[in-house]
Amino acid sequence: MKQTGAAPSAATTWAMLLPLVVAFAVFTIVPLSSSLVMSLHRGSGTTPLHFVGLANYRFLIADRGFWLAALNTTAFTLAFLLLEVPLCLALASGLRSGYAHGRSLVRFALLCPYFIGPVYASILFAAMLDARHGLVNRFLSFLSQRPVELPFLTDPRLSLVSMLVVSLWLGVGFGSLYLAAAMQAIRRELYDSANVDGAGMWGCFWHITLPSVRPMLAFLTLVGTIQAFQLFELPYVLFGGPGPSGAGMTVVMYLYGVGFEAGDFGYASAVGWGIVAVLSILLLLQYRLLRGLIK
């Protein structure tokens, strides 16, 4: 076979990679290195930094505020994943089935909340979940024929429910489209053979559909965990702060409060690396638990 062209030289290859390498160094390596160095100092943006070694990390280990935020974030992450994955599976199965009419319109409707963003969604749901004038309580009052004023935004026990509702509304549609795409790759012959053997709808789902989409389920679980630990705008706008009794405080919101409200950038950098450590441990545990799913 005639060779169509010579391989690019090393100089050409590095010339093409240089913009990416420079961008990665400027926007990733330099900020990470700066935050690591700053975490070993104490001071604000208006005062000189003083080297304190690992004092910020020792304080972080004993900081109850940080661990409360980490506990809130972990509880939200677990609840979100336990609800998101079954809902995504149900919606994706409905999209794939022949019973779903107007599937293009349904896909568009499921994708729309993802483009709205957490800030606008939080403003929208803050109005809907208002105790006295919110649409949700008005609807519940109509059903019960008596006034209902559930404090979705002011009760610590309901704050997690409020965050979950908004987060699921934003994320379930996008995840279901990922799973629907994975289901489209399953060969139809497998279902035909299973139906001939009398497997039925549930048998096909448990023995064909679910094993085939396991890598995508593992992907959605890992991505959902990362997104949950980045939660900031949603509770900050929904509750106007950390929420009732700090129930809406997340680790990123705590970092924001320490760094930009209290002005302690050194300790805020240590909090950021603490978040990296906690998230890395959780992702490692998830990877070990889900390792069999992605094979």
Image (cartoon, grey):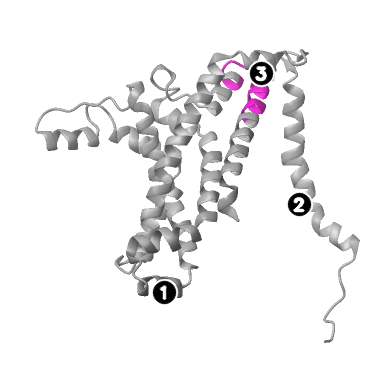
Front residue (pair 92, 151): 92
**Residue at image location 44% in from the left, 19% down from the top:** 246
**Residue at image location 38% in from the left, 60% down from the top:** 93
- Residue 50 visible to an observer of this rendering: yes
- In the rendered view, tell whether residue 67 sits above or below residue 97: above
Amino acid identity at mark 1 = Ser
**Residue at image location 65% in from the left, 13% down from the top:** 59
Distance (Cα) linking label 3 and label 2: 31 Å
Mark toward the start of the polypeptide (3 vs 2): 2
* 261 drawn magenta: yes
Amino acid identity at mark 3 = Tyr
Amino acid identity at mark 2 = Leu
Q: Which mark is residue 16?
A: none
Q: Residue 25 vs residue 46: left or right?
A: right
> Residue 36: which quarter of the image?
top right
Mark toward the start of the polypeptide (1 vs 3): 1
Q: Residue 195, percent across and down?
A: 36, 72
Quadrant of the image containing the C terminus: bottom right
- Residue at label 2? 20
Q: Which residues are magenta?
A: 259-275
Q: Residues within 10 Å of mark 2 (few under 14, many from 20)?
A: few
Taken as a whole, is the magenta stretch helix, strand or loop?
A: helix
- Residue at label 1? 193
Q: Residues within 10 Å of mark 1 (few under 14, many from 20)?
A: few
**Residue at image location 72% in from the left, 21% down from the top:** 39
- In the rendered view, tell whether residue 125 sits above or below residue 257: below
Q: Which mark is residue 267?
A: 3
The residue positioned farthest toward the left in the image shown: 145
Distance (Cα) linking label 1 and label 3: 61 Å
Q: Residue 138 vs residue 50: left or right?
A: left
Q: Are marks 1 and 3 in contact (CB under 8 Å)?
A: no
